[in-house]
Image (cartoon, grey):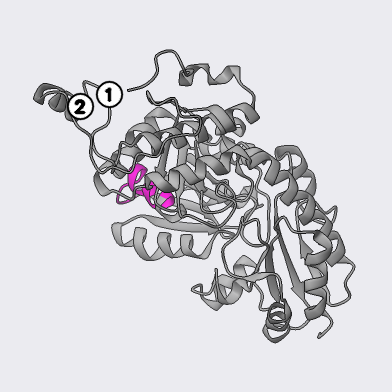
Amino acid sequence: MCVEGDEMEPQDFDEWGFDTLAVRAGQVRTGEGEQSEAIFPTSSFRFESAAQAAARFGGSEAGNIYSRFTNPTVRTFEQRLAALEGGERCVATSSGMAAILSTCMGLLRSGDHIVSSRAIFGSTVVLFDSFMGRFGVQTSYVPQTDLAAWEAAIRPSTRLLFVETPSNPLTEIADIRALADIAHRHGCLLAVDNCFCTPALQQPLKLGADIVIHSATKYIDGQGRCLGGAVVGSEELVGKEVFGFLRTAGPTMSPFNAWVFLKGLETLKLRMQAHSANALALAQWLEQQPQVARVYYPGLASHPQHTLATRQQTGYGGIVAFEVKGGREQAWGVIDATRMLSITANLGDAKSTITHPATTTHGRLSTEQKAEAGISEGLIRISVGLEEVADIQADLARGLALI
């Protein structure tokens, strides 16, 4: 049982600042009086009577039923992330892709239409085209930063606008407020994948978005330990529709992973500031290297949306992409010459990671789709970690010297 009066209710979260919410929001201590959040590794929960079981299943009494859709540790994570994003409700899922799937299955039906940026994660393109398409949901793709193209692509059947900002891997910045205005003018919803920034650097709901999606696997965890995802929004959209899909279909976050993510949230703002500082220093250094044709990082004055990023974000994030002169052979040579950076497609880790998007994260896209998304064979993506930035630079310099 919980300690009476020991915790604030969700409606009191607005009295706390971001850093306090990241450490305290959502925790309800048990009678043991634990300081850290408890983990509840149980599949089911006991009822006091048959009548209580019926009331719980029928929805007339709140409480735990089955860990597929009600678990105290997962609920604590959901409440904390919702508070950080400024949303009414969060639904935690088993992965970031499960969060996108749950959003689509909860909010869309056959005959609906999605307008999406071209600059999205390769697996999201496959989900939209190969799987949602089977159920009669069509998707049109537009340039991330072309507002006129977004508006022109909307049809009477359009239900959802979907965008990642910053995008993966070229860090294109979408104008969230302008997209929200377009969506709402046409009776559509705007979903923003906030994976690269997290609520520590960007809060799309405050800019007019309806849905925020996360891969908690990335920066929310921060140390590459667990898989998870989340959908944040209103009680009506997320608490009813998205939760309804999760309750039945079960793409559920485990209690242990939720506990790990809670620990990640406690240091999220500090880590995102450190990632951003290291990434900016690395991007500035890369711009000075003669073997590098172009650097993509919103913190650089050379970035096309630098001013927009400065306006709608409080930091520029930890992802840097750059094109080396040449092509795949030269890019692979740089990657293979590293000794410290981890060659892996994951990102958001305390350890810096490096990958070749054209053959990994976007490898399942067609040649035409890669070209449209700006994914060249010479492109390298780095998730800048928390090491000494001089050591990251030295590790890359070995490979750049081979070009």
Is residue 399 rendered magenta in the image? no
Indicate the amino acid at tag 1. Answer: Ala
Say which of 210 and 203 sits in front. Answer: 203
Mark 1 and mark 2 in contact (Cβ < 8 Å)? yes
The type of residue carrying mark 2 is Arg
Q: Secondary structure at mark 1?
A: loop
Q: Is residue 183 visible?
A: yes
Q: Residue at x 33, y 33 (%)?
A: 240
**Which residue corresponds to the image point at 40% horizontal and 28% vertical from the top-left?**
235
Residue 46 place in picture, x, y as percent:
19, 32
The quadrant of the image that shows the C terminus is: bottom right
Q: Quadrant of residue 337?
A: bottom right
Q: Quadrant of the N terminus?
A: top left
**Residue 280's spot in the image, x, y percent?**
80, 54
Give the mark nearest the N terminus, 2 or 1.
2
Q: Position of residue 239 (x, y in %)?
A: 37, 32
Extreme residue in the front direction: 32
> Measured along the vertical axis of the image, is residue 293 above or below residue 66?
below
Say which mark, if any, is on residue 62: 1
Which residue is found at the position 83% from the left and 75% from the top? 397
10 Å crowding of disc 1: few (<14), some (14-19), many (20+): few
- Left or right of 263 in this view: 315: right
Q: Nearer the viewer, residue 111 or 286?
A: 286
Find disc 2 in the rendering and name its residue. Answer: 56
Disc number placed over residue 171 in the picture, else none:
none
Residue 143 lies in what quarter of the image? Answer: bottom right
Instruction: Say few, some or many: other residues with alpha carbon within 10 Å of mark 2 (under 14 / 14 to 19 / 20 or more).
Output: some
Q: Main secondary structure of the magenta part?
A: helix
Chain part drawn in magenta: 99-111
Q: Position of residue 65 (x, y in %)?
A: 23, 34
Compared across the picture, whether 182 is left or right of 92 comes to right
Residue that lies at the very extreme toward the left in this rendered image: 50
